[in-house]
Image (cartoon, rainbow, N blue to C red):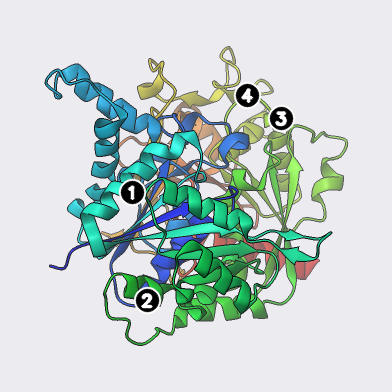
């Protein structure tokens, strides 16, 4: 078996330049050439994982199939490449230090003084190589969070320096930097990039390939200047401009030969450029999509990255339904009975967003009531589903004090209650019901029809067994539908159509009398990819389009 090749992706000048998109694009292009790839993210912050971080701090928390709370870039990795990431694909400084300290406490280091070099860097290197030992990968792409010069990132860059030396021609470094445009001077400036590369060189790392992020087209002379000042081959400098969609990035990188440059640097055959047929077909559909469908996201986080996977899932579903999805954020904390109609009546569909805590839940309940009573397609996810249940209990079952135990510990009608396994937990990080769990979907339900009729469904999480449809979806919650009230809900028109076969937990609720009123305890957005969009999002957007067309 050929040795695994390593691609390290670093960033300079500024954060948020798109290292995750570039890493995902590299992975996609190498997959198109027939290689087996995986992508991992090393985050320099000291949290063990992003599970306890406020979304305003770090965007959404993505969850892997094996139950790891991770950085949102892993969502990009999965959406672009279709791979399933795991705990080994996202490592933080906190996890590195935790592992080293646990080893020290056990006496594994035999009394040695524990230092950043070699103990921390050795642990980083071990985690960088662990995926290649676990799987048959041709390439492991490793993205380092933050920017060169951050004090938190120094041990990771030192680990890369050591690995590049140890691996020789089996490792390359792709460095993403920024080329700003100074409007007053009317010029693009390369000096920030030069300084960023010099900082890398000072740390002992010579980048092999440069990706220059810019808002304006870069001339051949400018890119040649960068190559000359940064000791990089001219054909190893590419530009990354703003594009109508992130899904065009792999195409633009391929046109400039980024994947070919990587292969040359690794002494591998370049061969012919693959066509990326299915990917181009998706982009063609996206460009040709006519008309708009308007979807409101009712939640408390006025931040795009807080609902990143939901936004991408809606966008993908719109493309496959031939429409452009236009999303509107409705702040659930500010939504009132006086303005709920004004804010929602013109929407074609509503997503009641996930989240945690008391803030904004009454607005979500108001939205769920309005859409149920006015038959607007509604999709509740996790806490959103729970608030749909609370709304139904209050306004249909007549339990005016109905609530989740999370929000009101004294309610007599705790239609959402804490899970038995969660009652005595005190540590908040990594202790929820996390990752993939099975669910049996009731035949004839809206949800069953969505999965069963999807032509391009992902067999990783959908299967038929013994005449039953069984799905495996990802969870992130502590509270559950209270089965003590199940019969009352079903007698009054809310059907429990998805049940976990082991725990009997309710995973999916619907109001069959409405055209599309579905709540899921799980997060289907984590499973939606460019080439295999999620069946529930496809079905939801289709229902929203039908409402738009009939109005």
For mark 2, does the 10 Å Cα neighbourhood hold few (<14), some (14 to 19), or many (20 or more) residues? some
Give SS at disc 1.
helix
Which one is in front in this view, the residue at disc 2 or the one at disc 3?
2
Q: Label 2: which residue?
A: 32
Is residue 511 visible in this depiction of the protein? no
> Which badge, 1 or 4, is on the more N-terminal residue?
1
Q: Secondary structure at mark 2?
A: helix
Q: Which residue is mark 3?
A: 362
Residue 404, image x and y in percent? 57, 25
Q: Does 18 appear above or below 318?
A: above
Helix, strand or loop at mark 4: loop
Distance from label 2 to label 4 (Cα)? Answer: 52 Å
- Foreground mark, 3 or 4, reads 3
Looking at marks 3 and 4 on the same chain, the residue that comes earlier in the sequence is marked by 3
The percent position of residue 353, horizontal first and vertical second, equals 62, 42
List x then y, in percent, for residue 192: 61, 54
Distance CA(mark 1)–CA(mark 2): 27 Å
What residue is shown at x 39% (from left), y 33% (from top)? 93
Of all residues shown, which one is farthest toward the top? 410
Tell me what residue is drawn at x 12 percent, y 67 percent: 1
Q: Earlier in the sequence, mark 1 or mark 2?
A: 2
Q: Position of residue 367 (x, y in %)?
A: 73, 41
Q: Is residue 151 above or below residue 203?
A: above
Disc 2 to disc 4: CB gap under 8 Å: no
Alpha carbon distance from label 3 to label 1: 49 Å
Q: Residue 83 sits in which quadrant?
A: bottom left
Question: Which residue position holds label 1?
Answer: 160
Q: Is residue 154 left or right of residue 19?
A: left
């Amino acid at each position: 078996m050929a040795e695994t090749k390593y691609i390290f992706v670093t960033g300079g000048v500024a954060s948020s330049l798109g290292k995750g998109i570039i890493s995902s694009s590299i992975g996609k292009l190498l997959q198109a050439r027939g290689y087996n790839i995986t992508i991992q993210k090393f985050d320099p912050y000291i949290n063990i994982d992003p599970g306890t971080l406020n979304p305003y701090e770090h965007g959404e928390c993505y969850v892997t199939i094996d139950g790891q709370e991770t950085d949102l870039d892993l969502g990009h990795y999965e959406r672009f490449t279709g791979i399933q990431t795991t705990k080994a694909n996202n490592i933080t400084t906190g996890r590195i230090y935790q592992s080293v300290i646990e080893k020290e406490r056990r006496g594994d280091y035999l009394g040695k003084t524990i230092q950043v070099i070699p103990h921390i860097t050795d642990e980083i290197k071990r985690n960088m190589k662990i995926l290649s030992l676990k799987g048959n990968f041709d390439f492991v792409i490793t993205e380092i969070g933050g920017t060169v010069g951050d004090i938190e990132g120094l041990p990771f860059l030192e680990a890369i320096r050591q690995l590049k030396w140890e691996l020789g021609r089996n490792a390359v470094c792709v460095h993403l930097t920024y080329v700003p445009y100074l409007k007053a001077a009317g010029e693009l400036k390369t000096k920030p990039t030069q300084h960023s590369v010099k900082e890398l060189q000072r740390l002992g790392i010579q980048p092999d390939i440069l990706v220059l992020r810019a808002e304006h087209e870069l001339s051949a002379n400018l890119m040649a200047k960068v190559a000359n000042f940064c000791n990089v081959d001219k054909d190893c400098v590419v530009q990354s401009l703003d594009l109508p969609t992130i899904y065009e990035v792999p195409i633009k990188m391929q046109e400039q030969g980024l994947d070919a440059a990587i292969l040359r640097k690794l002494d591998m055959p370049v061969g012919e450029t693959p066509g990326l047929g299915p990917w181009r077909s998706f982009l063609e559909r996206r460009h040709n999509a006519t008309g708009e469908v308007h979807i409101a996201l009712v939640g408390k986080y006025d931040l795009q990255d807080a609902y990143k996977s939901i936004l991408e899932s809606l966008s993908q579903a719109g493309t496959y339904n031939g429409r452009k999805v236009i999303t509107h954020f409705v702040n659930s904390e500010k939504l009132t009975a006086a303005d709920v109609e004004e804010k929602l009546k013109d929407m074609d569909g509503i997503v009641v967003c996930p989240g945690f805590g008391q803030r904004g839940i009454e607005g979500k309940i108001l939205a769920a009531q309005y859409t149920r009573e006015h038959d607007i397609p509604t999709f509740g996810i996790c806490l959103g589903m729970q608030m749909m249940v609370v709304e139904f209990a209050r306004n249909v079952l007549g339990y005016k004090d109905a609530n989740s135990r999370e929000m009101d510990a004294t309610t007599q009608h705790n239609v959402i209650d804490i899970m038995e396994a969660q009652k005595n937990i005190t540590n908040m990080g990594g202790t929820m019901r996390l990752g993939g769990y099975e669910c049996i979907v009731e035949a004839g339900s809206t949800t069953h029809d969505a999965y069963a009729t999807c032509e391009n469904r992902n067999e990783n999480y959908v299967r038929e067994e013994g005449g039953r449809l069984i799905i495996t979806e990802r969870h992130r919650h502590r509270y559950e539908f209270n089965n003590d009230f199940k019969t009352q809900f079903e007698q009054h028109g809310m059907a429990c159509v998805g049940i976990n076969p082991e725990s009997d937990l309710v995973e999916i609720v619907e109001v069959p009398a409405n055209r599309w009123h579905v709540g899921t305890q799980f997060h289907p957005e984590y499973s939606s990819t460019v080439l295999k969009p999620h069946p529930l999002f496809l079905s939801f957007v289709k229902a929203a389009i039908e409402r738009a067309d009939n109005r």
